[in-house]
C-alpha cells in the first residue's frame, strides 16, 4: 500500500505579505480566521456558509502551488478572465516529503474552460493549436470532454487522468 502521507501538509497565511488587510478577500471569514490550516490527511473537506470564502481559499491554495486558478494542471496557462484574488501571494504551502507526479486543480464551475483549452491545445497550428506530441485529450479518455455530460466528463477525468501519486 502506498504511503498515505499528504503532499500538502499545511497552508500558512503570511499576514506581512498582505498590502491591504481591509480589502477583499482578506475580510472574508475564512481568511480573517486563518493563520495556519493543517492538512493532516489525504482528503480535507471545507464546509461553511455561502460567501464565507471556501472557494476563494481553494483557488488561492491552487495558485500558490503554481496551478491555474481556473483549473487544470500546472501546464495550463490560459485565462478566460483574470478574476482570482491576491490571496495566493500571501499563502505559503507547507509541502510533505513526498512529491506528486503531477497536480490538477479540479474546479467544477470552470471545468468547461479546461475542456475547451484541451481542444485548443490539440488543434492544428493553422487553427491556433500547438504542434508536437500526442494529443492531450488522450489522457482524458477516448471521448472528447465536451461530448459528454458534466458528470461524465468528471468521471472521465477521474478514471483516465488521475492515478496513484
Image (spheres, rainbow, N blue to C red):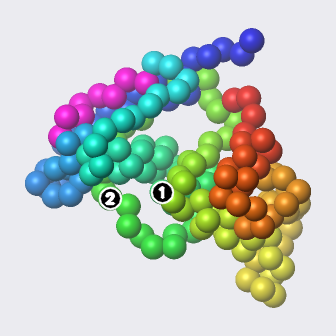
**Residue in front for this viewpoint, 150 or 91:** 150
Q: Residues within 10 Å of mark 2 (few under 14, many from 20)?
A: some
Q: Is residue 71 magenta?
A: no
Q: Position of residue 5 (x, y in %)?
A: 57, 17
The outermost residue toward the bottom is 126
Question: Which residue is at a point 65% across and 58% down the rendered structure image?
Answer: 150
Vertical placement of residue 156 versus 14, above or below: below
Q: Are marks 2 and 1 in contact (CB under 8 Å)?
A: no
**Residue in front for this viewpoint, 108 or 31:** 108
Q: Position of residue 73 (x, y in %)?
A: 63, 51
Q: Label 1, secondary structure: give it.
A: loop
Q: Label 2, secondary structure: give it.
A: loop
**Residue in front for this viewpoint, 104 or 151:** 151
Tell me the residue that label 1 is attached to: 69
Give the alpha-carbon distance from disc 2 to disc 1, as whole Å. Answer: 10 Å
In the picture, measured across the screen, residue 110 lies left or right of residue 54, that is: right
From the image, which quarter does the N terminus lie in? top right
**Which disc number belongs to residue 85?**
2
In the picture, measured across the screen, residue 140 lies left or right of residue 74, that is: right
Residue 158 visible to the viewer? yes
Question: Which residue is at a point 84% across and 53% down the rendered structure image?
Answer: 141
Vertical placement of residue 78 versus 55, above or below: below
Question: Which residue is at a point 80% across and 81% down the rendered structure image?
Answer: 125
Q: Position of residue 102 (x, y in %)?
A: 67, 41
Range covered by the magenta-colored residues: 32-39
Question: Which residue is at a point 60% across and 67% down the rendered structure image?
Answer: 113
Amino acid at each position: 500500500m502506498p504511503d498515505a502521507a499528504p503532499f500538502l501538509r499545511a497552508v500558512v497565511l503570511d499576514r506581512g505579505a498582505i498590502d491591504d488587510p481591509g480589502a477583499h478577500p482578506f475580510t472574508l471569514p475564512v481568511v480573517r480566521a486563518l493563520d495556519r490550516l493543517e492538512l493532516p490527511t489525504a482528503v480535507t473537506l471545507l464546509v461553511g456558509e455561502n460567501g464565507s470564502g471556501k472557494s476563494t481559499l481553494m483557488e488561492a491554495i491552487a495558485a500558490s502551488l503554481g496551478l491555474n486558478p481556473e483549473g487544470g494542471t500546472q501546464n495550463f496557462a490560459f485565462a478566460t478572465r483574470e478574476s482570482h484574488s491576491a490571496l495566493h501571494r500571501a499563502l505559503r504551502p507547507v509541502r510533505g516529503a513526498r512529491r506528486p507526479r503531477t497536480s490538477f486543480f479540479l474546479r467544477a464551475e470552470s471545468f468547461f474552460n479546461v475542456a475547451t483549452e484541451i481542444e485548443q491545445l490539440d488543434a492544428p497550428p493553422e487553427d491556433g493549436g500547438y504542434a508536437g506530441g500526442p494529443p492531450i485529450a488522450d489522457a482524458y479518455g477516448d471521448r472528447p470532454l465536451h461530448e459528454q455530460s458534466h458528470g461524465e466528463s468528471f468521471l472521465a477525468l477521474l478514471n483516465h487522468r488521475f492515478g496513484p501519486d
